[in-house]
């Protein structure tokens, strides 16, 4: 009986000590994880921001007015201009493909839609032009038609990028 009088209080003290120590170690572990996340965030945030900048440039560079800038349209046919535009769009996106790991899937999908719709637009615009049309007329028609359809896929993707940046800042 005397052993029980000593054993039961000892077990209660041991259980209390174990619970306190367990809670203390768990809090320390959470604190260390939070500090690691904070440190990682300091490293990742600038890289993510650069990715958003690159994707913004990508969207800007693949709009008709930027695609057509600095081209000698007088020396091109509609077909060669179309090929040049499609190649430029593909190269711009291929060059920035790795940036998708820094943006949400929804935003990346909007960027891919902008690419696909721009390529489709270039092809459709060329198919609407008579064979004898020169590249300058094709370019003018493209720029006018692209803006006349209301909100563009590039603008939707750009807005998604901006919204994500607002959330991380």
Image (spheres, grey):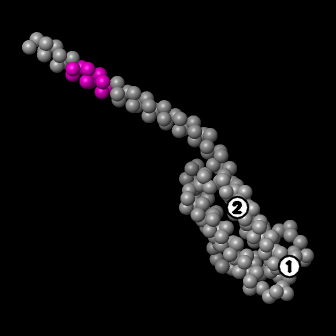
Q: Main secondary structure of the magenta part?
A: helix
Position above or below: 68 against 34: below
State how far apart marks 2 and 1 are (Cα): 24 Å
Please state, as top left, top right, bottom left or bottom right, where the N terminus lies in the image: top left
Left or right placement of residue 76 versus residue 41 in this view: right
Give the residue at mark 1.
77
Q: Residue furthest top?
A: 2
Task: Locate residue 16: give its quadrant.
Answer: top left
Where residue 93 is drawn, which disc sits there?
2
Region of the chain picked out in magenta, as a range: 11-20
The secondary structure type at the circle numbered 2 is helix
Position above or below: 83 against 137: above
Left or right placement of residue 30 versus residue 132 in this view: left
Callout 2: few (<14), some (14-19), or many (20+) C-alpha neighbours within 10 Å? some
Determine the residue positioned at 39% across, 31% down: 26
Position above or below: 40 against 63: above
Q: Residue furthest left?
A: 1
């Amino acid at each position: 009986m005397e052993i029980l009088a000593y054993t039961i209080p000892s077990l209660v003290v041991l259980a209390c000590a174990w619970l306190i120590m367990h809670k203390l170690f768990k809090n320390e572990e959470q604190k260390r994880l939070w500090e690691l996340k904070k440190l990682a965030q300091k490293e990742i945030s600038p890289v993510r921001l650069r990715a958003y900048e690159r994707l913004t440039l990508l969207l800007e560079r693949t709009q008709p007015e930027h695609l057509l800038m600095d081209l000698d349209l007088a020396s091109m046919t509609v077909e060669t201009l179309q090929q040049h535009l499609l190649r430029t769009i593909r190269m711009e996106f291929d060059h920035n493909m790795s940036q998708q790991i820094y943006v949400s899937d929804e935003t990346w999908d909007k960027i891919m839609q902008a690419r696909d719709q721009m390529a489709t637009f270039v092809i459709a615009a060329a198919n609407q032009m008579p064979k004898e049309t020169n590249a300058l007329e094709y370019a003018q028609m493209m720029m006018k038609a692209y803006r006349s359809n209301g909100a563009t896929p590039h603008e939707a993707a750009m807005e998604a990028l901006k919204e994500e940046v607002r959330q991380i800042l």
